[in-house]
Image (tube, helix red, strand yellow):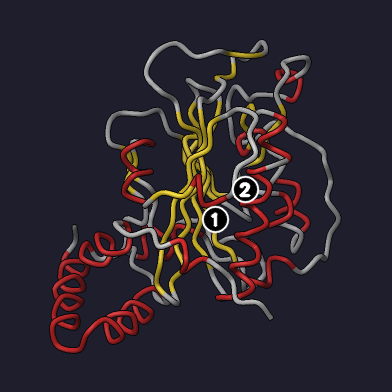
Amino acid sequence: MNLKMLIGGLAAAAVVLAGGYDRFRNYVEQWTGGNFLPQSNVGHVLGSSPTATPAIADMGLPEFDGERRSQIIHHVGYTVSYNAETKIPNYVAWTLTPERFEETVSRTDKFLPDPEVADPVTTDDYKRSGYDRGHLCPAADNKWNEQAMEESFYMTNICPQNHNLNGGDWKELEEACRDWTMEWGKLYVVAGPILHDGQHKRIGESRVVVPDAFFKVVLCPAPLKAVGFVYKNAAGSCPMETYARTVDEVERIAGMDFFTSLPDSLETAVEAECDWAEWQLPRH
């Protein structure tokens, strides 16, 4: 933890004691509108659109509990940690704002190897595998920019996914994230595969690992709240709330620490709660 984050955490605690939770939330909103990372760590400035800000700039890159192969790649619409051993991403992180849903380009459906990867996976690895080429950062979140749309089909953003899950409950969650963004203005999202201990099925000449499950964590800065989700990589049709977890639970399952640039006291508070009622949109 750097000095700025330590001071921020102590200040947050003081605010809670002095003024209650409403003042605490106001304090958080001021922090989440800024940039917690040192300028040298912000990295790639994404795209030409004023709304194209990197997901890592405000909330920080996820950190792994143990050693893991990771190549960080910044694309216009998302940041990916690619694992050259498993041939799938460790995670994909992006920021959602309403401007990202302005449809200025059409969906391409052209899957491509990522030019940033030395030994890239291709779409041929998925042929006759029985699995969909499942997006982590959805194409529908990238209609605002031609390059963002093209890069959303890079194979570093793709995992082998059960067809029923891809077109069913996982898609429902993607749509809910867009609805939440339109209601509250901004979300920070991280999604990725879950690999349990043991041997894993692999597909294609590249030996692409098939995940056991998938996670997604969502942080809304105003009003401050967070929620996580875990989906088995299998067919199913359940209400979205049955997949909901606290972010803390997802961190334990996925072996990662999310939203690392939040002051520790704020991160601890928001990641420990999952009140599904807070994610129900009002009827208009």
Disc 2 marks which residue?
A: 137
- Count numbered badges in the picture: 2
* Helix, strand or loop under label 1: strand
Q: Is residue 227 above or below residue 183?
A: above
The three-letter amino acid code for the residue at tag 2 is Cys
Q: Is residue 235 above or below residue 47?
A: above
Q: Give the residue displayed 40% in from the left and 23% down from the top.
A: 196
Instruction: Please give left or right for residue 231 compared with residue 179 in the image.
Output: left
Q: Is residue 211 above or below residue 49?
A: above
Instruction: Please give left or right for residue 36 compared with residue 129 in the image.
Output: left
* Labelled disc at residue 94: 1
* Labelled disc at residue 2: none
From the top left corner, tell me how far across and down residue 117 is, in percent. Answer: 58, 31
Q: Give the residue displayed 78% in from the left and 14% down from the top.
A: 128
User: Can you tell which quarter of the image residue 31 is in?
Assistant: bottom left
From the top left corner, tell me how far across and down residue 177 is, in percent. Answer: 60, 60
Q: Give the residue displayed 55% in from the left and 67% down from the top.
A: 280
User: Can you tell which quarter of the image residue 270 is in?
Assistant: bottom left
